[in-house]
Amino acid sequence: MFDYLIVGAGFAGCVLAERLAVGSNKRVLICEKRSHIGGNAYDCYDDDGLLIHRYGPHIFHTNSADIFDYLSRFTGWRPYEHRVLASVDGQLVPIPINLDTVNRLYGLTLTSFEIEAFFARVAEKIDHVRTSEDVVVSKVGRELYEKFFRGYTRKQWGLDPSELDASVTARVPTRTNRDDRYFTDTYQAMPLHGYTRMFERMLAHPNIKVMLNTDYREIVELIPWTDMIYTGPIDAFFDHIYGKLPYRSLEFRHQTMPESSVQAVGTVNFPNEHAYTRITEFKHLTGQEHARTSVVYEYPRPDGDPYYPVPRPENAAIYEKYRELANATPHVHFVGRLATYRYYNMDQVVAQALKLYAGLCANDAEGAPDARSIRHAIARDVGGDRVHREPGR
Ligand code: FAD
Ligand code: UDP
């Protein structure tokens, strides 16, 4: 008899399994339909012994000391600041757009002060910033928008930026200084021995049983459990009763090269050329020393494994219906990027999972004493989110 059946062994599932087993002495079965743990953050060694991320580049970054400390229980870290170049007009220039980007692209020598005036001159005035187009053109104008964002976004999402919520392109800031880091979070680091090793340590507890290669539907009626934590796509859980929620997919083409390095930075973006959006060379991320190198090309696809929720109003409306159904489903808790249909980074998923755990503890007389302080600290640092089924029996 299990206290919890956890569906999916990604960040959301592993954090909850660890907390419930270690923090609350619950018996947990974690069931994963893939052949490995880790969800989309899974990494492994390829045939040449190079550490790669099978589902595309995963760079850990957070402003939350609590999240970083929590994960530090299971891994050491390698400091790493991600840098990205975009191939535009025959040059490789920094993205996010910064002072050097504009100067190199236009052969200028603007200072930080002058570039503010430059942006003010080219920016379009938009009263209500609503879409992913609005966000960019209202900051850097139409020309830079077209060079850096329009083509990339159309390729990545199969939609024009004007059809996507502002939050999508708002992930990429604009800078007036020369900072060329992709992220500016306080904590930026990669798990020292990889994500998979970290997940293995999270799940290494006698109260946790892991079942791979198993869709939960194969066992849900066979194995007794009290509560379920579900981290898969929410529409699939309810048999798509309100229609399919769109999730964008990718095809990852991995390639090992004989050279020791092939590009200057971790990722090169291709907004306007090629069918792929970006190439990532893993050695920059992992710091691995090796005579050869391994890269991944990302080709956006409409169908396939669900990787990205698609943030736009009509999808939010469909999700809302599923969320209501989820709220009315006792003993099942929905958490994670697919189950709450949110374009979340890893740290946000960890925060959401810890928050759900704190809620479960609050409803449980045997709950862990540190739950409330974790919940408050995380809500402060990572930005609020709702966990969609607070336990209430
Ligand atoms: P997932 O990792 O998707 O885990 C859900 C698991 O549930 C999966 O393993 C799935 O197989 C399993 N499952 C689904 N249905 C069933 C079923 N019926 N039965 C059994 N198991 C099931 N975040 C960052 O912070 N930094 C990055 O650099 C970054 N890069 C990314 C790059 C790409 C290409 C992608 C796609 C995402 C990236 N992310 C990044 C986001 C990150 O992957 C997610 O935030 C995080 O992995 C989500 O964890 P999760 O547990 O919610 O979901
Ligand atoms: N984007 C873009 N050009 C770029 C980088 C990003 O148009 O060079 C847009 C695109 O819509 C992308 C979104 O900004 O999907 C978010 O970018 P991010 O790098 O955060 O995407 P992720 O790593 O989550 O795929």
Image: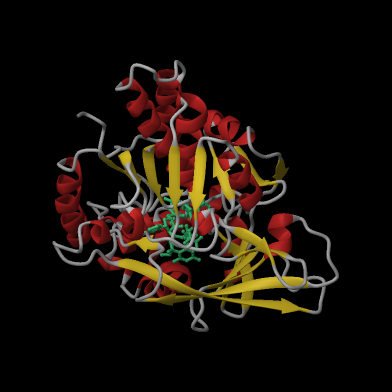
In the rendered image, the vertical position of residue 106 relative to residue 17, given as above or below: below
In the rendered image, the vertical position of residue 364 relative to residue 76, given as above or below: above
Residue sitting farthest toward the bottom:
274
Residue 179 position within the rendered picture, expressed as x and y whole percent measured from the top left: 62, 49
In the rendered image, the vertical position of residue 301 relative to residue 171, given as above or below: below
On the rendered structure, is 105 left or right of 255?
left
Q: What colour-coding does the image apply?
A: secondary structure
Residue 221 position within the rendered picture, expressed as x and y whole percent measured from the top left: 28, 52
Residue 195 appears in the picture as rendered: yes
Residue located 68% across and 57% down the image: 285
Residue 318 position within the rendered picture, expressed as x and y whole percent measured from the top left: 17, 58
Q: Nearer the viewer, residue 43 or 113?
A: 43
Residue 169 position within the rendered picture, expressed as x and y whole percent measured from the top left: 40, 59
Residue located 20% across and 62% down the image: 239
On the rendered structure, is 391 left or right of 257?
left
Residue sitting farthest toward the right:
291
In the rendered image, the vertical position of residue 160 relative to residue 365, given as above or below: below
Q: Nearer the viewer, residue 44 or 297?
A: 44
Label tally: 0
Residue located 64% across and 57% down the image: 83
Quadrant of the picture in which ligand 1 is shown:
bottom left
Viewport quadrant of the C terminus? top left
Residue located 31% across and 59% down the image: 217
Viewport quadrant of the N terminus? top left
On the rendered structure, is 336 left or right of 128?
right
Where residue 79 sits, quadrant-wise, is top right
Residue 184 appears in the picture as rendered: no
